[in-house]
């Protein structure tokens, strides 16, 4: 897969998130970046994270096994940054492209 980079995936992820939260009325003075946290900064609930995962899989047209990102040692993670998700996606997409 050519042109695939963490930065490109991070920008795509930010656009997907902006589409999901456009009607939420959040005050995002600092904008959205790789350091933005889903729960703390964007007020994502678990159902929102599921919607995000579905939107990402639809965008890339493949199942990506988000359970490996969302679970740590048998427990759900409490929050994720956009960079963490982007790094996960790079690894998954590159692995599937081999």
Image (spheres, grey):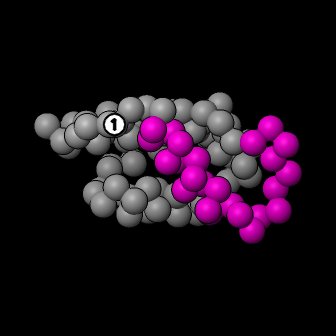
Q: Residue at x 71, y 63 (%)?
A: 22
In the visual, does 24 lie left or right of 21? Answer: right
Q: Observer-nearest residue: 52 or 74?
A: 52
Residue 64 appears at what percent x and percent y? Answer: 32, 50
Q: Residue furthest left?
A: 98
Q: Is residue 22 magenta?
A: yes
In the visual, does 59 lie left or right of 42? Answer: left
Q: Which quadrant, please, contains the N terminus?
A: top left
Relative height, residue 84 to residue 45 (above, below): above
Relative height, residue 64 to residue 77 (above, below): below
| Among the 4 quarters of the image, the one containing residue 6 | top left
Q: Residue at x 57, y 53 (%)?
A: 15
Q: How many marks?
A: 1
Magenta region: which residues? 8-31
Q: Residue furthest front?
A: 3
**Is residue 91 in sight in this rendering?**
yes
Q: Which quadrant, please, contains the C terminus?
A: top left
| Residue count near mark 1 (Cα–Cα under 10 Å), binned few <14, some 14–19, many ≥20 | few
- Kindly state the secondary structure of the residue where label 1 is placed: loop
Residue 88 appears at what percent x and percent y? Answer: 40, 36
Residue 85 appears at what percent x and percent y? Answer: 48, 39
Relative height, residue 75 to residue 19 (above, below): above
Q: Observer-nearest residue: 1 or 20?
A: 1
**Is residue 77 in sight in this rendering?**
no
Q: Which residue is mark 1?
A: 4
Q: Residue at x 45, y 38 (%)?
A: 8
| Among the 4 quarters of the image, the one containing residue 36 | top right
Residue 90 appears at what percent x and percent y? Answer: 36, 36
């Amino acid at each position: 897969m050519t042109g695939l980079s963490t930065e490109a995936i991070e920008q795509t992820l930010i656009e997907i998130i902006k589409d999901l939260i456009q009607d939420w009325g959040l005050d995002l003075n600092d904008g959205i970046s790789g350091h933005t946290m889903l729960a703390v900064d964007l007020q994502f609930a678990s159902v929102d994270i599921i919607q995000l995962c579905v939107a990402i899989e639809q965008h890339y047209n493949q199942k990506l096994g988000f359970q490996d990102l969302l679970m740590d040692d048998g427990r759900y993670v409490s929050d994720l940054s956009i960079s963490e998700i982007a790094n996960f996606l790079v690894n998954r997409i590159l692995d599937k492209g081999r």
